[in-house]
Image: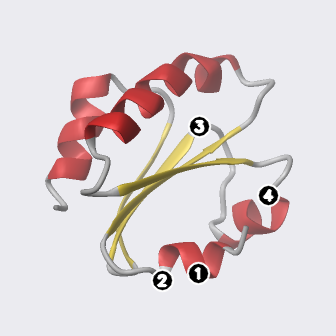
Amino acid sequence: MDYNNLTGSKGVVLVEFFATWCPHCRHMSPIVEQIKELLAGKAEVVQLDIDQNAQAADAAQVQSVPTFLLYSDGKLLWRQSGEMDAEALLAKVESAL
């Protein structure tokens, strides 16, 4: 996946960098899927496995997983690593809409 095309797109994009071997990422996966469903048509939610998307992870300077990046019209608005509860993550994305 071309990270530059993803982050340069119009609208709001939440990117989660994760790894299949990461227990924190496995915990966040259903939360991110729920947010993806709730925001369908309003924001794009993309999950990128760092082992399959190493170039994108390097471009985003990901050093730990999970890492969340929130973009609006290609501009980075927010970045955080680690677990979050669903309400906090949803609120963060909704604040960019």
Q: Does residue 20 lie above or below 51 as drawn?
A: above
**Kind of residue indicated by mark 1:** Asn
Question: Which badge, 1 or 4, is on the more N-terminal residue?
Answer: 1
Question: Which badge, 3 or 4, is on the more N-terminal residue?
Answer: 4
Residue position for label 1: 5
Q: Which mark lies nearer to you, 3 or 1?
A: 1
**Please, what secondary structure does the residue beneath circle 3 have?**
loop
Residue 75 position by quadrant? bottom left
Q: Does residue 10 lie above or below 17 as drawn?
A: below
**Marks 4 and 2, how far apart in space?**
17 Å
Q: Which mark is residue 8?
A: 2
Q: Are marks 1 and 2 in contact (CB under 8 Å)?
A: yes
Q: Does residue 96 lie above or below 36 as drawn?
A: below
Q: Residues within 10 Å of mark 1 (few under 14, many from 20)?
A: few
Q: Which mark is residue 80?
A: none
Residue position for label 4: 53
**Please, what secondary structure does the residue beneath circle 2 have?**
loop
**Marks 2 and 3, how far apart in space?**
21 Å
**Left or right of 34 on screen, residue 60:** right
- Image position, residue 57 (x, y; %): 72, 60
Residue at horizontal 55 percent and vertical 73 percent from the top:
6
